[in-house]
Image (tube, grey):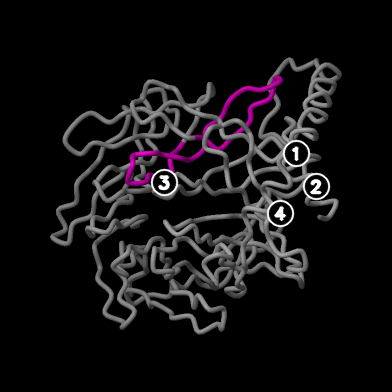
Amino acid sequence: MSDTNRRIIILLVGFTTVSLLPGCTNWEKNYRASEKNYRASEKKYKALEKIYTSQLQYQITDLGKVEKYSRGVKSINDNGQIVGSVGLRYVWVETSCGRALVPRGHSRAVLFDPTGAGNNTELGSLGGKESRAHSINNKSQIVGSAQTNSGNVHTCLFDPAGENIDLGEGSAICINDNGEIVGVSGDHACVFQRSGENIDLGTLGGDHSSAKTINNKGQIAGWAHTSSGDMHACLFKPEGENTDLGTLGGKESYALSINDNGQIVGQANKILNDFMVYCACLFDPSGAGNNIDLGTLGGGYSIAYAINDNGQIVGSAGTSGGGRSRACLFDPTGSGANIDLNMVLPESSGWVLEFAISINNNGWIVGKGRNPAGEEHAYLLTPRSNR
């Protein structure tokens, strides 16, 4: 076990934060409290290290290069089919307002080759140059967005054979096994219909919303603005009142994934040691506010991107010392026994996994990291028992 891996689940509250609250003068007190947490977490790590390394090990497959500042892969179904986008990159340029990230090239929706041989299938567009694949269901139906020949961005139901279907203005984010498609059109979350008569899912009293996920029971989650303008995670109800899922004590949250058991994950903010921090969150679907802070890997930031039907949650989390985020398998109880996925790779892999984006019901995980050459590549993790 390398020194880097030995720091993996040290769960101190670090100082990698989003914003410093006004009037913070307790630096020394905060530092001493964090140092105490660090020592306690070290002991906890040593007790758990043998369990994790002996019971959970993954094989990694390199899915190929993805561009910097892009996630690349977006979704994996239970058959191991993987979709995402390649081609679009971002570069820093000097502008009249200072340095800014500017897109270069064109995003292309792809069905990745899961063997790592690089035989990816480009899914085309709707006549334009750009396309993005966001979700694939267990019937191999793929949705996302694509440019038309006039340059407008429309919702797209992709066909690997090339007969893509235009579902009108907007962007599809998720499709369930029943073929129900959700996303955003205009300023609101919606359910897309092939007839074009889309269902507007409304908001939480504000102006904007977006549907990010739908399970096989038709439950839809995402985010919506409240009447005060705050962005809150939302459980949408097409035939009833939407449910505000709240936060972790701050003002913002959003939901990214819902499984067939109705468990919802995403990110929410809170105030900790006079800082505003953003943490992965398991939301209370009733809206009663009993949300669970899923913690980090020792840093001050985390996000949960996906949850499967077995309750396994993946995402990304900050590490101690303000280092780069690491791909994370979260402890759903919120007790902090999170696993840095770099810890459960073969010792000689040479990879640094930064994001875990999607997980299927077999426990297969896709995400983005740096390969042994230091290049940003998409990856597939499969439990060794499955190989």
For the residue marked with disc 3, what is the amino acid? Ser
| CA–CA distance in space, label 1 to label 3 | 29 Å
Q: Residue 303, position in %: x, y?
A: 56, 42
Specify which label sits upstream in the sequence, 1 or 3. Answer: 1
For the residue marked with disc 4, what is the amino acid? Met
The structure residue drawn at horizontal position 41% and vertical position 66%, both measured from the top left corner, is: 133
What is the number of the mark on residue 45? 1
Task: Provide the residue designation for mark 4.
Answer: 343
Q: Secondary structure at mark 2?
A: helix
Specify which label sits upstream in the sequence, 4 or 2. Answer: 2
Res 100 → quadrant: bottom right
| CA–CA distance in space, label 4 to label 2 | 8 Å
Specify which label sits upstream in the sequence, 3 or 4. Answer: 3
Decide: few, some or many residues near mark 2? Use Cα within 10 Å; few <14, some 14-19, many ≥20. Answer: some
Magenta segment, which residues? 254-281
Task: Provide the residue designation for mark 2.
Answer: 6
Res 175 → quadrant: bottom left
What is the number of the mark on residue 252? none
| CA–CA distance in space, label 3 to label 4 | 25 Å
The structure residue drawn at horizontal position 31% and vertical position 44%, both measured from the top left corner, is: 189
